[in-house]
Image (tube, rainbow, N blue to C red):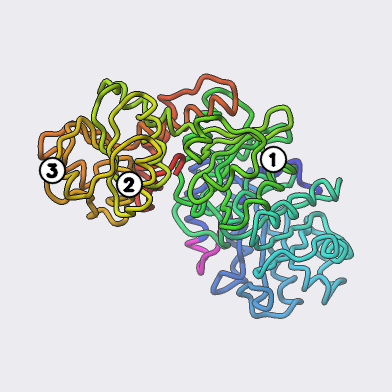
Amino acid sequence: MRNSSRLPRICVALGFPTTKQLLEMAEREIENGSSFFEFRLDFLDAPETGAEAIRQLLQRHPDVKLLATCRRHQNHGRFNGSIDEQVALLERAAAAGAIAVDVEIESAESAPQTVDRLRNVTDLIVSYHSYNGTPPLEKLMIRMQRAPADGYKVVTTARKPGDLLRLLSLVKEKPGVPLILLSMGEIGFPSRVLSVKMGCLYSYAAPNSAQGTAPGQISSEKMRAVYGVEKLNRDTAIFGLIACPVKHSISPQIHNRALQARRVNGVYVPFLVETGQLKDFMQLANDLPLKGFNVTIPHKQKILRYLDAVDPIARRIGAVNTVWKKAGKWRGTTTDVAGTLKPLKDKVKLRGARFLIAGSGGAARTAAFALSDAGAQVYLTGRNVDKVRALAKAVNGRYLLHEEAEQEDFDVLIHATPLGMFPHTDGIYFQNRIPGDLVFDMVYNPRQTRLLQEAAAQGKVCMDGLQMLVEQAAESFQIFTGEEPPRSAMEAAALRALETDYASLPSNLENHG
């Protein structure tokens, strides 16, 4: 693009029915630090008023950059006019000060001479959108480059991690071609961060106080403050989390804050990896490449088959939550052990202490093995009798029925089931007597679960899951970067995420959930 050197790396997409709403939202975003906007003229009830809105905003804020789009309804937009009318609106937008206009490839192909007129007045971006998947991209780029333009935007929908990799690989395959590459939906989210790091012109974000114009857009504030998109470059190291689901995770807030605090040129992004897609993800991890990543539900056990080396404790537990590459080989370990033991060591002497663990999943397995190795007496209870009995046998512990566990006395009760986590906050494993002097609930959203509330009422000492979450993350951060983890900054980031953006989202018992 002729104007690319002047473009911020985050374009806030604004689509509203009236110019009053459009301008009010732009003003709010400018106050929050945004300076580049897409005005979706096709969202306006009267698209012809868009040019005047552009003129008004630029009169007040001459340093702001504006991109105008008026997508036709035939191409998933809202404009019902002809191509001639579409181009006329965009010409007016350019005359009002828009530094670029976006026209879909279908319009450029149907009326090439008409669309090409736009290049006489501003930069022209030719765009392609696929809402059904990711098509063969080499063939698509040949098609798109037949239309003369100053930039090419390719927006697809990822169905698996490999789709994301194919899209981002266009940067290397088309050197010198000005690109905007995005993949919609949750699987495609990393493209909104990584495309800029890899050399694309810019990415899109939603406004902070309204919905965006496409699936997967996050707020401009998160793009700036959490992911640091404006500061990413080709040397930025990539870290991440793989999980299913993953959108509720607060790991990006924790790890990106740690990277920023230690001035590490890196970014941490969430990857949605569905069941059966691990092999596909590992190809992405190798080719992007990733420097390291965390693992949680449902991949902590299956990831082992893709690793070249696994720490003995993780092998015994049968689960890995931290993976990194060293000397060309993928290595795995679990920081769940440190996350479990360190908070407890500050409260109780582990050796000889009686621990009751409720649950049989990955968090319960980690606690059971870690405490057994530390010399504690381990008792287990849970609803999946076969799994709990097998775990008890593996750690030389003892299985108890729920009723039996409730009648005994323990130094510590560790709750490692999903009961009580948001949004089902009424759940509680022990309805009556809580059989532990110290109650450690691994759920961290909400921090004060019903179990902890009841425990406090019964005079118990209480611990929530936040310290465990932060300690797990800190151990992983040190493995990834070799830097001392800034625990206080990480804890503050976790608290901020829980109190604001993630207050309405479910937590996860596993590391980095």
Q: Amino acid at mark 2?
A: Gly
For the C terminus, which image quadrant?
top left
- Residues packed near mark 1 inside 10 Å, few (<14), some (14 to 19) or many (20 plus): many
Residue 19 lies in the magenta-colored region: yes
**Residue where numbered disc 2 is placed:** 359
**Residue where numbered disc 1 is placed:** 197
- Residues packed near mark 3 inside 10 Å, few (<14), some (14 to 19) or many (20 plus): few
Element marked by disc 3 = helix
Residue 37 left/right relative to 113: left
Picture layout, residue 205 above or below residue 314: below
Element marked by disc 1 = helix
**Residue where numbered disc 3 is placed:** 407
Task: Report the magenta residues as a range.
Answer: 14-21
497 and 305: which is toward the camera: 305
Occupied quadrant, residue 228: top right
Mark nearest the camera among 2 and 3 is 3
Q: In the rendering, at what x and y percent does residue 156 appear?
A: 69, 62
Q: Amino acid at mark 3?
A: Gln
Residue 296 left/right relative to 508: right
Q: In the rendering, at what x and y percent does residue 382 appear?
A: 29, 49
Residue at 68% over, 66% down:
133
Residue 25 lies in the magenta-colored region: no
